[in-house]
Amino acid sequence: MTVKIWTSDYEVGVESLDADHIMIFSLINHIDDAHQSDCDKQAIGKMLKVLMQRALAHFKREEAFMRKYNYPGLQHHAEEHREIIKDLQKLYVAYQDTSNVIASRAIVRILCSWLEEHIMKSDMQYKPYLSK
Ligand SMILES: [Fe+2]
Ligand SMILES: [Fe+2]
């Protein structure tokens, strides 16, 4: 089952940031498929780790672009990133402690719906500044 497909509606106009978003959606779908197919917990743990690393690297890259182009909404935007990182890290620690698939599913669901809304509402706001 596909959770979310990236379409050009999500395009923010910076190639590397769009590539990050595509990669994160792909990982989310891949982990979701793994949940449905009795994939072993060790493999899911590794995929979650990659997902977390990619998400953190993306936030850093995005903030660096916003800084470079003096985007006035940087501080508020970075705060949104910090909030979701806190939530994800809590869930990731819970997953590491228990290997509980409920925590793993929660990471996928929360990140997916957060990302969709965040790209459409917050990332889109920097689009005119960064794609000059
Ligand atoms: Fe983003
Ligand atoms: Fe963002």
Image (cartoon, rainbow, N blue to C red):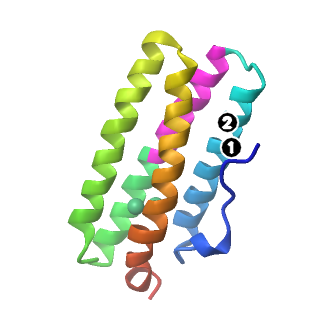
The dominant secondary structure in magenta is helix
Residue at 28%, 69% (x, y): give it.
67
CA distance separating discs 1 and 2: 5 Å
Q: Position of residue 45 (x, y in %)?
A: 57, 22
Which numbered disc covers residue 29?
A: 1
Q: Position of residue 40 (x, y in %)?
A: 70, 15
- Name, please, the residue furthest toward the bottom: 132
- Mark 2 element type: helix
The picture quadrant where one finds residue 84 is: top left
Is the Cβ of the residue at disc 1 closer than 8 Å to that at disc 2?
yes
Q: Dot 2 surroundings within 10 Å: few (below 14), some, or many (20 or more)?
A: some
Residue 84, placed above or below residue 33? below
Magenta residues, start to end: 41-55
The picture quadrant where one finds residue 132 is: bottom left
Q: Position of residue 104 (x, y in %)?
A: 54, 27
Which numbered disc covers residue 32?
A: 2
Q: Position of residue 7 (x, y in %)?
A: 68, 68
Is residue 43 in the magenta section?
A: yes
The amino acid marked with disc number 2 is Asp
Disc 1 within 8 angstroms of ligand 1 (CB): no
Residue 92, placed above or below residue 9? above
- Mark 1 element type: helix
Is residue 98 in the magenta section?
A: no
